[in-house]
């Protein structure tokens, strides 16, 4: 007995919608593509699901309905031009971070062999995206959590240098003062008391929450950027949508110029950029 893929997807989308999943049809189709090995855009041409494939699909849909992240079910997450492996113990990259990466690449487009630092690298997605787009760059990624480091090592696979360190350490990357051409960071920034979607509870809390106001790590990142960047070099920091004024203010307080607030595709404040004063 077989099941048409279109029927399975329709039933899955209804179940995911009833469970409160934000993008039920999308997720149902992505999971079907994962089970069948057929690209999502060609699912109409996919053969019917046999009994084993149908059971595997139902299991994945049930896990997604329980609000397990889609990326955990797939084992991968996409950030711009790269795909990284993810799972328990590491923060799942979000699509909005692609805007930060694109900004960073544009900021050093005219810099030959730039020295780039990615703080709070997690899975290594930002560092890998930069290294992929700019093979001439020297890319360095910093992470302190042992579980995240294991994922980053697997994803970076020598494409960037991985440093096991706390971004809040005063002597982080000592000896690099005034040499870095670009610093990017997607730090833990959600205020501790914030209610988050069920999927977020699968991310390590230390990679999500940033203290009472969400700025504990951001403050350290701004100070580190002021120390490491060469004069005139740019920094980009992702932040909570409640930080649209606070993070730019922190950058100005540390002497940065050309401070700019950026919004995500939903129109929410999402990251701030600036240039180290000369």
Image (cartoon, rainbow, N blue to C red):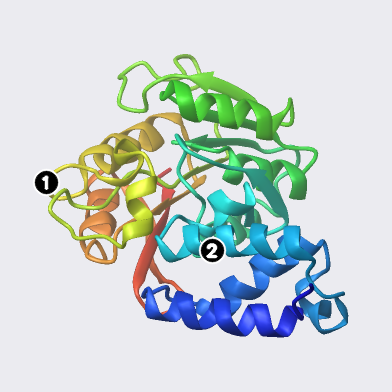
Q: In this view, does 145 lie to the left or right of 13?
A: left
Please tell me how many numbered marks the rendered image carries.
2
Q: Is residue 274 left or right of residue 188?
A: right
Q: Earlier in the sequence, mark 1 or mark 2?
A: 2
Q: In which quarter of the image is residue 223?
A: top left
- Residue 139 visible to an observer of this rendering: yes
Residue hosting label 2: 95
Residue 257 spot, x, y in % from top left: 37, 55
Residue 74 spot, x, y in % from top left: 63, 53
**147 and 156: which is toward the camera:** 147
Q: Name above or below for residue 116 compared with residue 174.
A: below
- Residue 260 visible to an observer of this rendering: no
Residue hosting label 1: 212
Q: Name above or below for residue 207 compared with residue 239.
A: above
Residue 77 spot, x, y in % from top left: 61, 53
Query: Badge 1 local density, few (<14 within 10 Å), some, or many (20+)?
Result: few
Give the structural element (helix, strand or loop) at label 2. Answer: loop
Q: In this view, does 99 lie to the left or right of 263?
A: right
Which quadrant, please, contains the N terminus?
A: bottom right
**5 and 120: which is toward the camera:** 5
**166 and 70: which is toward the camera:** 70
Spot the residue most to the front.
1
What residue lies at 19% left-to-right and 60% top-to-bottom?
195
Q: Name above or below for residue 184 compared with residue 197.
A: above
């Amino acid at each position: 007995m077989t099941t048409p893929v279109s029927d399975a997807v329709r039933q899955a989308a209804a179940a995911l919608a009833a469970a409160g999943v934000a993008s039920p049809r999308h997720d149902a189709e992505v999971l079907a593509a994962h089970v069948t090995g057929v690209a999502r855009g060609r699912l109409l041409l996919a053969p019917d699901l046999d009994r084993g494939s149908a059971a595997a699909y139902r299991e994945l849909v049930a896990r997604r309905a329980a609000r397990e992240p889609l990326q955990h079910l797939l084992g991968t997450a996409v950030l711009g031009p790269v795909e990284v492996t993810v799972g328990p113990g590491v923060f799942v990259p979000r699509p909005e971070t692609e805007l930060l990466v694109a900004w960073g690449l544009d900021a050093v487009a005219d810099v030959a062999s730039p020295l780039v630092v990615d703080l709070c690298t997690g899975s290594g997605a930002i560092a890998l995206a930069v290294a992929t787009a700019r093979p001439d760059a020297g890319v360095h990624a910093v992470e302190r959590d042992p579980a995240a480091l294991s994922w980053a090592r697997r994803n970076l696979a020598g494409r960037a240098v991985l440093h096991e360190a706390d971004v809040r350490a005063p002597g982080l990357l000592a000896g690099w003062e005034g040499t870095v051409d670009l610093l990017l960071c997607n730090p833990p920034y959600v205020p501790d008391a914030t209610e988050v979607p069920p999927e977020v509870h699968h991310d390590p809390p230390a990679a999500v929450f940033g203290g009472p106001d969400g700025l504990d790590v951001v403050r350290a990142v701004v100070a580190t950027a002021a120390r490491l960047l060469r004069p005139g070099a740019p920094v980009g920091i992702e932040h909570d949508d409640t930080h649209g004024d606070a993070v730019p203010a922190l950058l100005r307080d540390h002497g940065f110029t050309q401070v700019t607030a950026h919004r995500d595709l939903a129109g929410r404040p999402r990251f701030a950029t600036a240039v180290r004063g000369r």
